Image (cartoon, grey):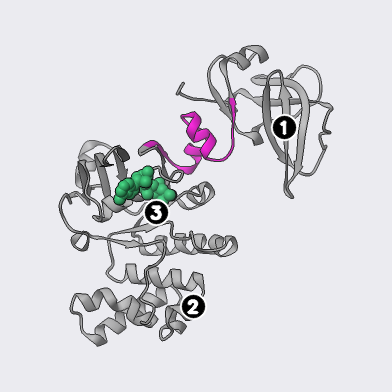
Amino acid sequence: VSSSQEASFPAAVSLASVSRHFDAVKAVDQVDLTVHEGEFFGMLGPSGSGKTTCLRLVAGFEQPTAGHIAIFGEQVDGIPPYRRSVNTVFQDYALFPHMNVVDNVAYGLMIRGVGKKERRRQAEETLELVRLSEFVDREPGQLSGGQRQRVALARALINRPKVLLLDEPLGALDLKLREQMQVELKSLQRELGITFVFVTHDQSEALSMSDRVAVFNQGRVVQVGTPVDIYERPETRFVADFVGSSNILEPAFCERIGAPSGLWSLRPEKIRLAPEGLSDEAGTIDVTGEVRHVQYQGATRRCVLAVKDTELALAMPAVGVEPVVGRTAHVRWRLDDMHGMKQV
Ligand code: ATP
């Protein structure tokens, strides 16, 4: 994208060198981020890495200690939350317990002085969008977790914000429901075309829902990219470890096995069992090691192989030859599947 194009299509959200320090704690530290219009953008990181603070800065519940935030090209420094074109879905949903579903959803319109009939019409329309039309008269306590989550969504969507911020939106749901809601959220976002920015500490959720992901560590954004970028090409040891599991090949180990020198990440599923003897394929590395553990996981089998002083993790389909603990095994991977990382 050229700079002239960028000027005519401002980013949905942009953070320029934004920090939020609480005394000595650098909750958010010099973060630069650009979220494009219509994107489903994930903020991923371990607990305490600054994701929620970052989201609250965009929402306006926190003010930066330094730096600037713009929403659709408009600087929002000092502008209160209700005057920003964003809305937030909180993790605990923050529904009013003694208000029925339709009044919960219409609340924001009531505050703005919209008449009762019009409020109801818009609330019912929004509830239809999240497939809750049958539940308009219930109170939150009479709904399942997934239904409450959809009420919270409808309530945040009724004002048609340009950007929807979601803090661990599916965190309170059990695994099955969460997977179902991941699909629903994604298709709702596509249907509405609204920019979604969501926070999660769950790497599989971030990978499966996001168009792009920002990985946070200790208040900083350490990598931004598509899920494939982040998974296949982690730039640092931290990203390689936090997003999925990875083998880290140290320079000394590489030397011993005849691989190019450097610090590399190699995903367990890229290593496969191979027949003994030298590889006749070009561009591959072959090693032999002792099988330490084998773990059957249904669709896959995970295996740990000790090669010299390094343990390699392998993930292979559960069908086929099973490695035997205590025996030697020969494995092979492609040089192309080793991804170089920074020495940090
Ligand atoms: P989690 O996934 O656990 O919610 P997070 O990545 O969202 O974590 P934040 O909630 O943004 O992390 O917190 C980042 C750091 O800032 C933490 O060390 C936290 O203790 C600190 N912090 C956040 N809010 C405040 C506050 N109001 N006062 C003091 N410290 C704070």
Q: Nearer the viewer, mark 1 or mark 3?
A: 1
User: Residue 191 versus residue 225: which sits nearer the camera?
Assistant: 225
Q: How many marks?
A: 3
Q: Quadrant of residue 114?
A: bottom left
The amino acid on which the numbered mark 1 sits, given as a three-letter code, is: Val
The amino acid on which the numbered mark 2 sits, given as a three-letter code, is: Leu
Q: Is mark 3 within 8 Å of ligand 1?
A: no
In contact (CB < 8 Å): disc 2 and disc 1: no
Q: Is residue 174 left or right of residue 323?
A: left
Callout 2: 10 Å neighbours few (<14), some, many (20+)? some
Residue 310 colored in magenta in the image = no
Tell me the residue that label 3 is attached to: 198
Q: Earlier in the sequence, mark 2 or mark 1?
A: 2
Tell me the residue that label 2 is attached to: 143
Q: Is mark 1 within 8 Å of ligand 1?
A: no
Quarter placement of the C terminus: top left
Residue 51 visible to the viewer: no
Residue 194 bears which disc, if any?
none
Residue 304 bears which disc, if any?
1
Q: Earlier in the sequence, mark 3 or mark 2?
A: 2
Q: Which residues are magenta?
A: 221-248
Q: Is mark 2 within 8 Å of ligand 1?
A: no
The amino acid on which the numbered mark 3 sits, given as a three-letter code, is: Phe
Residue at mark 1 to residue at mark 3: CA–CA distance: 35 Å
Residue at mark 3 to residue at mark 2: CA–CA distance: 24 Å
Per the image, label 2 sits on a secondary structure element best described as loop
Per the image, label 1 sits on a secondary structure element best described as strand
Q: Residue at x 21, y 49 (%)?
A: 63
User: Residue 29 versus residue 305: which sits nearer the camera?
Assistant: 29
Residue 230 colored in magenta in the image = yes
